[in-house]
Amino acid sequence: MSTRLGLISDVHASPVALAEALQIFAEQRVDDIICAGDIAGYYDTLLPTVRLLAGSGCKTIIGNHDQSWLEKNTAEDNNAGHHEIRDYLQQLPQTLELCIEGKRVFVVHANPPSEQHGGIKLRDRYGNIVAERKADWTQSLADFEPDVLIVGHTHQVYAEQLGRVLVINPGSVPFNHSCMILSLPDLSVETYALGDREITHCWNFSMQQS
């Protein structure tokens, strides 16, 4: 038996790109969907984004932009849409740990144990995998017990075996134009481009301003 997981991250209030990823997952008949955080940030269309995620049954964790949104939008805010967003974001866990097809899967926004800043950066700004970074993270994760680590935050797209741990970042839905499907227990990963765009393997805001 095989289980297929749709993987997304760093949605950043982009309902159009999110809807396309969810459509791909529906067409590919995934068994479940996981989002590695950062539902909020960058764009203002957060409410329809939250409704799409909630309606999809996606297993979602909280990211740093989500924490910032909660801090800026207090419970006393009378905006009905904000109440709906707050209710959704407040119930998100910091991490997920799942056992699927005999494989242990751990989800965190940036890096273990529960960090929302920093992150696992394996690529340089040109999108190339850096051998030294792989070696450093392989050493850092030497005692990490799960078989699969799913992260986001860095807006980098990769699926790399670091020692005994398969580390996956599906990239940002709107900025990397990417989502992934992970098959268990064989640990195969398929990457899909969104919006008729080529996948950008490394993206950050400062690069766009240089």
Image (cartoon, rainbow, N blue to C red):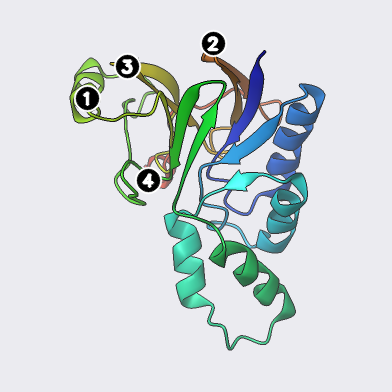
Distance from the alpha carbon under mark 3 to that under mark 1? 8 Å
Which residue bears the numbered disc 2? 186
Find the distance from the CA under tag 4 to the CA under tag 1: 32 Å
Viewer-side label of 4, 2:
2
Residue at the image position 69 percent from the left and 54 percent from the top: 49
- Residue 190 percent across, percent down from the top left: 60, 16
Q: Is residue 68 above or below residue 50?
A: below
Residue 88, relative to residue 76: is it above or below? above
Asked if the residue under mark 4 is in contact with the one under mark 3, i.e. CB atoms within 8 Å, the reply is no
Instruction: In the rendered view, tell whether residue 179 sits above or below residue 128.
Output: below
- In the shown orientation, is residue 52 left or right of residue 206? right
Q: Secondary structure at mark 2?
A: loop
Residue extending farthest front: 102
Cβ atoms under marks 3 and 2 closer than 8 Å: no
For the C terminus, which image quadrant? top left
**Which residue: 27% across, 19% down?**
130
Foreground mark, 3 or 4, reads: 3
Q: What residue is disc 1 on?
A: 142
Specify which label sits upstream in the sequence, 1 or 2: 1
Label 4: element kind: helix
The amino acid at mark 4 is: Ser
Percent position (x, y) of residue 57?
A: 72, 46
Q: Earlier in the sequence, mark 4 or mark 2?
A: 2
Q: Tell me which amino acid carries mark 1.
A: Ala
Marker disc for residue 206: 4
Q: Is residue 75 visible?
A: yes
Quarter residue 6 falls in: top right
Q: Earlier in the sequence, mark 3 or mark 2?
A: 3
Q: What residue lies at 38% left-to-right and 28% top-to-bottom?
A: 146
Q: Alpha-carbon neighbours of circle 2 within 10 Å: few (<14), some, or many (≥20)?
A: few
Using the image, tell me which numbered label, if any, was put on residue 164. Answer: 3
- Closer to us: 88 or 104: 104
